[in-house]
Image (cartoon, rainbow, N blue to C red):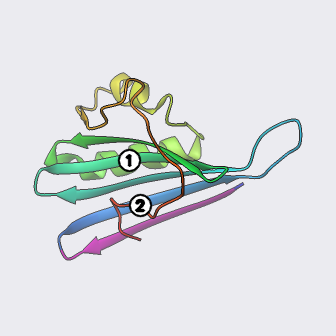
């Protein structure tokens, strides 16, 4: 299990990214990578949780109030350190009363892509 956290000041705002990887353990778990990232935008803070596994990407994206970057960054670190996946992260945001607007349109709040793509939120 690896964990990496980054915070960077960009020309248009702040951004953070945390990464948690899981190894393939036959009969126990599949290899996957969870990416937790956020960036400030003029509209507010974009936050995303992505699962990259077997050549597919599942992601869930929210928009939080503009003044919440510091709190979102700490929440993403918590989610990463505790291995919370995209299926539960919205529940955690609700449990801690973090306001957000879900940007995904799919029924289960997760979009799927056939191939991994770089994180469009944090741009690295």
* Cβ atoms at labels 1 and 2 below 8 Å apart: yes
Q: x, y (%) of residue 114?
A: 53, 50
Is residue 121 left or right of 34 when viewed as pictured? left
Measure how far apart labels 1 and 2 are at the Cα level: 9 Å
Mark closer to the chain start, 1 or 2: 1
The furthest residue to the bottom: 11
Task: Tell me the residue at 60%/41% (across/down).
Answer: 83
> Any mark on residue 56, and which?
none
- What residue is drawn where x is 50% and y is 41%? 79
Q: Residue furthest right?
A: 26
Crowd around label 2: few <14 · some 14–19 · many ≥20 (10 Å)? some
Whether residue 86 sits left or right of residue 25 in the image: it is left
Q: Position of residue 18 (x, y in %)?
A: 49, 57
Q: Is residue 115 above or below residue 61?
A: below
Residue bounds of the magenta highlight:
2-11
Determine the secondary structure under disc 1: strand
Residue drawn at x 55%, y 36% as measured from the top left: 84
Q: Main secondary structure of the magenta part?
A: strand
- In the image, 98: left or right of 12? right
The mark found on residue 48 in the picture is 1
Residue 16 on the magenta span: no
Residue in front for this viewpoint, 42 or 74 = 42
Total numbered labels placed on residues in the image: 2
Residue that numbered label 2 is attached to: 119
Quadrant of residue 109 within the rendered picture: top left
The quarter in which the N terminus is drawn is bottom right
Q: In the rendering, at what x and y percent does residue 52 appear? A: 58, 51
Horizontal and vertical percent position of residue 12: 17, 70
Front residue of 103/19: it is: 103
The residue sitting at the front extreme is 114
Q: Dot 2: what SS?
A: loop
């Amino acid at each position: 299990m690896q964990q990496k956290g980054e915070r960077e000041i960009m020309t248009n705002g702040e951004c953070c990214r945390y990464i948690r990887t899981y190894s393939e353990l036959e009969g126990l778990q599949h290899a996957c990578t969870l990416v937790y990232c956020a960036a400030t935008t003029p509209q507010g803070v974009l936050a995303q949780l992505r699962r990259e596994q077997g050549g597919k990407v599942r992601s869930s994206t929210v928009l939080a109030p503009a003044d919440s970057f510091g709190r979102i960054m700490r929440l993403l670190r918590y989610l990463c350190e505790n291995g919370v996946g995209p299926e539960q992260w919205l529940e955690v945001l609700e449990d801690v009363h973090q306001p957000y607007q879900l940007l995904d349109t799919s029924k289960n709040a997760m979009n799927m892509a056939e191939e991994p793509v770089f994180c469009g939120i944090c741009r690295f």
